[in-house]
């Protein structure tokens, strides 16, 4: 069994591999005196048939799921909810969308065509739609 204790108080157990339902974190039979290795916040344990990896089980959510802008562009924020201690990053697939953390900017659209881009945040997709820059229709002179 793998145990994890609070480093400031060894009387406080934070985790053991028997806690998870359905024996999810068991190593299998015949494994004794295995030396775990800690790298990048995860614990790696050799087993008779492979390697077990333990670490934070992260969950993520974003809101809203999409945004619509006029041809003038603008800025917005995405609310990112993540499990404690779980890192995340954001990146856009379009040059006209600039991302910094959970804030993004949409450049003005010089094209008459609408355009759609996405921002990927912790494996979730946020869709950005921007209207085309269509010229205003001219009114007839006799009106």
Image (cartoon, helix red, strand yellow):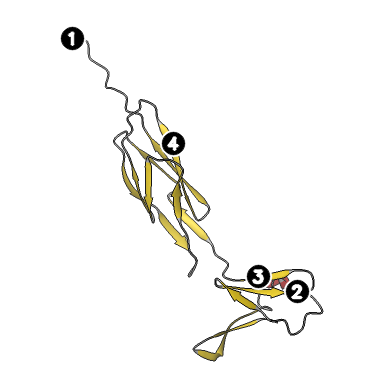
Instruction: Look at the picture and state if 141 lies above or below 118.
Output: above
- Dot in front, 4 or 2: 2
Location of residue 47 by image quarter: bottom right
Q: CA distance from mark 4 to mark 3?
A: 38 Å
Q: CA distance from mark 1 to mark 2?
A: 84 Å
CB within 8 Å, label 4 to label 3: no
Q: Which residue is mark 3?
A: 53
Q: Say which label, 1 or 2, has the lower sequence index.
A: 2
Q: Say which label, 4 or 2, has the lower sequence index.
A: 2
CB within 8 Å, label 3 to label 2: no
34 relative position to 87: left or right: right
Which residue corresponds to the image point at 24% horizontal and 15% vertical from the top-left? 138
15 relative position to 133: left or right: right
32 relative position to 12: left or right: right
Q: Which residue is mark 1?
A: 141
Q: Which residue is mark 2?
A: 47
Q: Say which label, 3 or 2, has the lower sequence index.
A: 2
Rendering coords of residue 6 (x, y %): 53, 85
Q: CA distance from mark 1 to mark 4?
A: 36 Å
- What is the crowding at mark 1: few (fewer than 14 residues within 10 Å), some, or many (at least 20)? few
Name the quarter where the C terminus is drawn.
top left
Which residue corresponds to the image point at 43% horizontal and 58% vertical from the top-left? 80
Which residue corresponds to the image point at 53% horizontal and 53% vertical from the top-left? 123
Rendering coords of residue 15 (x, y %): 60, 80
- Dot in front, 3 or 1: 3
Q: Which residue is mark 4?
A: 116
Rendering coords of residue 16 (x, y %): 64, 80
CB within 8 Å, label 4 to label 2: no
């Amino acid at each position: 069994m793998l145990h994890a204790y609070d480093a400031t108080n060894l009387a406080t157990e934070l985790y053991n591999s028997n806690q998870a339902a359905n024996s999810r974190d068991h190593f299998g039979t015949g494994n004794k005196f295995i030396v775990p290795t800690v790298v990048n916040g995860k614990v790696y344990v050799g087993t008779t048939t492979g390697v077990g990896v333990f670490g934070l089980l992260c969950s993520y959510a974003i809101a809203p799921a999409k945004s619509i802008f006029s041809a003038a562009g603008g800025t917005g924020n995405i609310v990112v909810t993540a499990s404690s201690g779980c890192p995340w990053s954001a990146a856009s697939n379009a040059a006209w969308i600039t991302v910094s953390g959970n804030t993004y900017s949409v450049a003005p659209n010089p094209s008459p065509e609408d355009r759609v881009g996405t921002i990927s945040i912790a494996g979730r997709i946020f869709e950005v739609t921007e209207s085309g820059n269509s010229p205003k229709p001219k009114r007839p002179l006799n009106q």
